[in-house]
Image: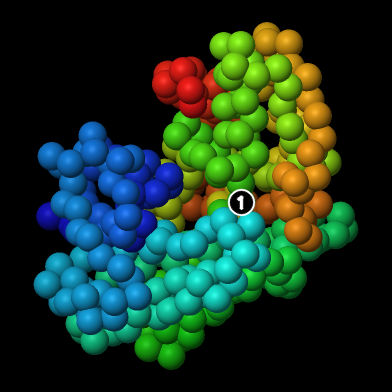
Amino acid sequence: MTKCLITGCGGFIGSYLAEFLLTEGLTVYGIVHHSTARIEHLRDRLAIIHCDLLDRERVGEIMTQLQPGFIFHLAAQSLVSSSWEDPETTLRVNILGSLYLLEGVRKAAIEPVVVMMGSSSEYGFSYEDKVPIAEDNRFAPSSPYGVSKIAQDMLAFAYFRGLHMTIVRVRPFYIIGPGKTLDACSDFARGIVRIERGQQRSLKVGNLEAVRDVVDVRDAVRALWLIADKGVPGEAYNLCSGKGYKIGEILDKLISLSGAKVIVQSDSRKMRLADESLLVGDNSKLRRLGWEPRIPLERSLADILDFWRREPIDC
């Protein structure tokens, strides 16, 4: 039975990926550092391993003992705002965590397919004449998080080129879906549900002009498995829809789906430092593997609203 190992399995994308791989009949092991709340419903089918990826020896032990056929490296400090507040931790977790994982694979003398999760933040600032952004676009990071993901990306490529490891790199754009927290789309939906309940009257927002390429997490995990199974070693793949939406458009769609009377107020505290104005990707390489998004934006947004409606009254 093929063994799949997911780092960051307790996170938003990791939890969805674990469930998807299980439905595909694969044996799944999940490395978790903090909370397991997102994967409690999978506990009887999923082997959970508690590990800090900065514990080099423990990571090496896991690789030697488990010998997975596929590794999905999703664990990261992934908040752009946190990367400005504590850049050192972001760089240490994202770069050294990836290094120790690759070294663990190397020293265990195993040959798994490693899916290295990057980010569209590697591209950072882009220009309209360079959109949609292809995988060979230049890097122009706008945050320490983006820098950390470039370093991780290049580490993966070096281990592919220098040690002939089977590594594919993925650069996801804006992944949304039920259960995600601490991002604009989720914050909007949560606030709208609170307005529906009479718990607040207005919705405070940041930059509504930024354009983002949006993919539902359920489409994203299908892509990750396809890339692992069919992707070309050494290549990078954009995980994106190829369509851009202003953040304000997404907010308008959420308000329309709700029907609530929402007063929108700008709040400078919600503005990102050095926010990218335009991030829309070219997904041609991924489509050539046979993937295409199936879930329309409106369904994703409706499901996100319903997620928050199921949460406690003081959500």
Residue at the image position 83 percent from the left and 41 percent from the top: 209
Q: Is residue 71 above or below residue 176?
A: below
Q: Is residue 312 above or below residue 84?
A: above
Residue at the disc numbered 1: 173
* Front-most of residues 129 and 57: 57
Q: Residue 52's spot in the image, x, y percent?
A: 30, 68
Q: Is residue 173 above or below residue 70?
A: above
In which quarter of the view is residue 228 placed? bottom left
Q: Is residue 151 above or below residue 79?
A: below
In which quarter of the view is residue 187 placed? top right
In which quarter of the view is residue 203 placed? top right
Question: Mark 1 is on which residue type?
Answer: Phe
Q: Quadrant of the N terminus?
A: bottom left
* Front-most of residues 92 and 227: 92
Residue at the image position 30 percent from the left and 41 percent from the top: 37
SS class, disc 1: loop
Residue at the image position 13 percent from the left and 39 percent from the top: 44
Q: Residue 178's spot in the image, x, y percent?
A: 47, 31
